[in-house]
Amino acid sequence: MTKPLVVILMGSKADGAHCAKIAAALDGLGVERELRVGSAHKTPGHVSAMLAEYEAGGRPRVYVTVAGRSNALSGFVDGSVEAPVIACPPPSDAFAGADLFSSIRMPSGVAPALVLDPANAALLAAKILAQADPGLAERVRSFRQAAAEAILADDSKAREEPLSGRLA
């Protein structure tokens, strides 16, 4: 079986720190990933050629797009590929959050998922790919179980020492 791949596509190098968080979360789940840079506005030919190469490769894949301001990248990618696309725009205060609207509304027939937290975008990509990869499915289950166990441990501490302030 061909190993699944997550392609993290950033609109510019300014999105690098946000992409690093996605990459780190994927690494933690043992998911192969590649970081790429391409702009729907400035280098549409480059993005189209890149996507055509990935689509022809036949590997199970998910694209995570990271672009701020006018997030045309997510719609452009989703409209160009058969694989799932997850939009994970970086946070921005520049437009009082109004730039997020370009990720929320897409034309009919274009449907990238929108996940704002980088680690959760990685988790969704892993869960999608895990449908065809039993090893990855087990790693996702283990990750989720560890998160549940941490909550249960916190609950136990809270019951033992309510209002002590030691939970943090």
Image (cartoon, helix red, strand yellow):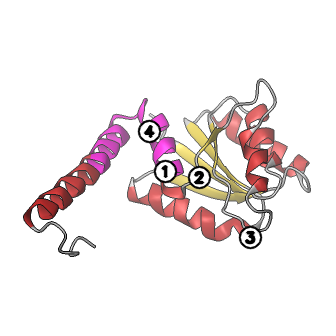
Q: Identify the residue under disc 3.
A: 14
Residue 28 shows up from this direction:
yes
What's the residue at 70%, 66% (across, down)?
15
Mark sitting earlier along the chain (4/1) = 1
The residue indicated by pointer 1 is 120
Label 3, label 4: how many angstroms apart (C-alpha)? Answer: 27 Å
- In the figure, 94 relative to 130: above or below? below
Disc 3 secondary structure class: helix
Which amino acid, mark 1? Asn
Horizontally, residue 167 falls left or right of residue 9, namely left
Q: Is residue 126 magenta?
A: yes
At label 2, which amino acid type do we have?
A: Leu
Residue 119, percent from left and from top = 48, 56
- Crowding at mark 1 (Cα within 10 Å: few <14, some 14-19, many 20+): some
Q: Quick check: marks 4 and 2 in contact, CB under 8 Å?
A: no
**Over which residues does the magenta segment extend?**
120-144
Looking at marks 3 and 2 on the same chain, the residue that comes earlier in the sequence is marked by: 3
* Residue indicated by mark 4: 127
Q: Amino acid at mark 4?
A: Lys
Q: Which mark is residue 116?
A: 2
CA separation in Å, label 2 and label 1: 8 Å
